[in-house]
Amino acid sequence: MVMEQIISRCGNICSECPWSTFMRKKIAKEDWEEYSKQIKIYTGFKPVKYEWEGCVGCFTPNNELPSHPFFNFLKKCRTRKCGEQNEIPNCAYCRRFPCANTVARNNINREKISEKLGKVVSDDEYERYIKMFDAIENLNEIRSGLKDSQIKNPKPVVHQPEISKLTSEFKNENFKFVYEKLLEIANSNLRIKGIDTVAGLELHKIREELLWRFLWILVLFGEIDGNELRIDSGTLYDNRKPISLPSNEEDWRLYFDILSEFGISAELEILTDNLYTPGGYMRAKLPKSNDSAYIIKMKVSSDLQKFPFFKVLNEILSMLQKKTGKRAFSNFKKLNFNPLLD
């Protein structure tokens, strides 16, 4: 009996996915190891068998998901939330498709894998090892078969930044200037188009959380020299929690581009030829050592040089830590500087 094809919210083929419970039932135990090795050749990741026996898919309601922490990624998935909100099975049914806010990416397809392997991927190889992850192509295929009446406009949502109101004005002009610059960042779309959708809003939350944590680490743990600042990747890594650092240079550039809109420029200085792990993630520290893999260098525009921006922000955050202790970062990302006004 042939299993009905199951397409995820973002366009992956769940019924053919090596990480799914469906494929684990289809592949015999004695064949699994060889199958896993072949998948790794094409995707870069090996689907080892875990104790929960595979992902049950994004259409499974939250209350029916296994309790294992692995499934938190499904609960948090912005594309899953957006599909549920708009009552559509996947992105192909949305009027905004293709949308830059979905988790669907065009990074696993025949062309890119052929380039990676240095050979032309055959039809058989594509069907067995790649097609299930060729999300954009899968969604395009679905979209081409839909009638216009099946395509829906997303239900709009409103972006409301969580910013604490000041109980009075800053008497310190330096503090006031830095606060107003942070307020600009907090009220911005952070380069997200379509922030009026659930997927856009969820992506904004992710960028916002990382950006505030990034600024927090930079200013408290980086080396400030006048209008310039530098910090090594090891220091970033050691203080990153509760967020994850960008996994590649392109992702870092996105955050650098966001900050550049507010007068803060940044660049990466790569310190190694061994920057990426075998799985394709950017290292923070070099293997078998505590050496940093890169340095981030930052400087401010002439507008921000009217006040020593990094130094003043360091003073604000240090005072916030002294006044509010463990609540300091939570207060910072809400721009709750009221404890400093007492």
Image (spheres, rainbow, N blue to C red):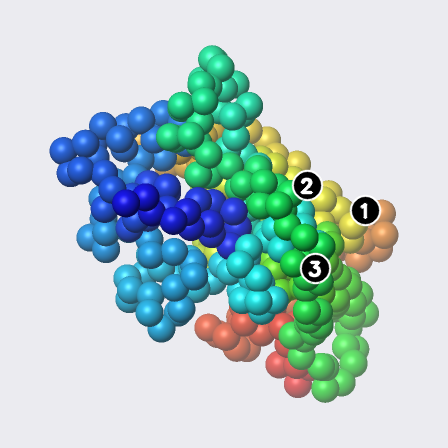
Task: Tell me what residue is drawn at x 62 percent, y 81 percent.
Answer: 339
> Which residue is at 21% across, 35% downward?
32
Is 290 placed above or below 209 here? above
Q: CA distance from mark 2 to mark 1?
A: 11 Å
Helix, strand or loop status at disc 2: strand
- Image disc number at residue 266: 2
- The residue beneath circle 3 is 149
Mark 3 vs mark 2, CA separation in Å: 47 Å
Relative to residue 94, is residue 131 depicted above or below?
above
Q: Please tell me how many numbered marks the rendered image carries.
A: 3
Left or right for 40, reference 210: left
**Where residue 213 sits in the image (x, y, percent)?**
55, 58
Residue found at x 42% / y 30%: 127
Which one is in front, 219 or 280?
280
Element carrying mark 1: loop
Q: Position of residue 286 (x, y in %)?
A: 39, 32
Badge number at residue 301: 1
Q: Closer to the camera, 231 or 45? A: 45
Query: Measuring 77% from the left and 77% from the top, which residue is drawn there?
Result: 170
Rendering quarter of residue 152: bottom right
Q: Is residue 311 visible?
A: no
Sequence order check, earlier mark of 1 and 3:
3
SS state under label 3: helix
